[in-house]
Image (tube, grey):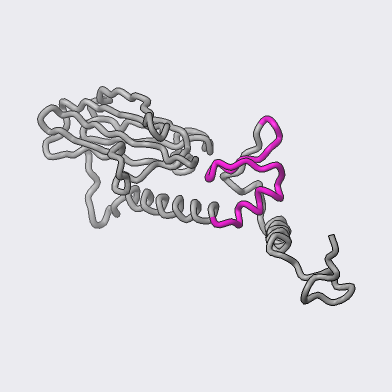
Amino acid sequence: MDYQNRVGSKFGGGGVAGASEANVDRRERLRKLALETIDLAKDPYILRNHLGSLECRLCLTLHTNEGSYLAHTQGKKHQTNLARRDARDRKDQQLSIPPTQSNVPRKIFLKIGRPGYRVTKIRDPETRREGLLVLVHLPNIKEGVIPRRRFMSAWEQKKEPPNRAYQYLIVAAEPYETITFRIPAREIEDEEEDATGWNWSHWDPDTKQYNFQFMFRSHY
């Protein structure tokens, strides 16, 4: 292809770059900049599979080499997902901040063991999204107490060595012991933003049943 005789170019200058060439050049500059400034060893979302390719566990994308992965981390999709995860982690941290001893006395109660529960895998037949249905039976729950649940990252918990492949679902209700489920580290759909009705929770004070269902966010 003759690059020297394009309109607007000077002789010997190589021609005016088109949109595709400009995009290639931009991605290459971003890749070089990322290689110089980013330490992949500290990236919690990178995973090398058995084929030697690199996976982004945050965006569920596949990359042939480090340069391709680093270029992806500078893109809009990865940055948007990072912002979402950061907002959710801050929300979880706010829920987990313990009260100061000077202002609120520590609650002491006798734990009576774990409640009965059942966990069932579910799937939306239309969108093929996967999720979990959790049923918890709390016949001896303390009067006036409402069961609570939240999700915890692998680095927040202290019981097991952190594993980026998992996160934890925690259910608490006095005077029962807190129960924890290890689930895949996939993004959870927000119950308030779900218009399909698959994400819900319900506490029945008459039957003492706490039931909830949540779906993993689909990236397809």
Residue 59 sits inside the magenta stretch: yes
Where residue 29 sits in the image (x, y, percent)?
72, 62
Query: From the image, which quarter does the N terminus lie in?
Result: bottom right
Q: Is residue 188 visible?
A: yes
- Which sits in the foreground, 126 or 84? 126
Residue 40 lies left or right of residue 59; in this view the side is right
Per the rendered image, the range of residues in magenta is 50-76
Q: Quadrant of residue 129?
A: top left
The one of 83 and 170 positioned closer to us in this rendering: 83
The spot of residue 196 in percent (x, y) is 30, 40
137 in magenta? no
Specify the quadrant of the image occupied by residue 28: bottom right
Residue located at (45% from left, 37% from top) = 167
At 88% across and 75% down in the image, what residue appears?
11
Relative to 43, is 66 on the left or the right? right
- In-image side of 82 versus 5 (left or right): left
In percent of width and height, residue 92 lies at: 37, 48
* Residue 184 picture location, percent across and down: 46, 33
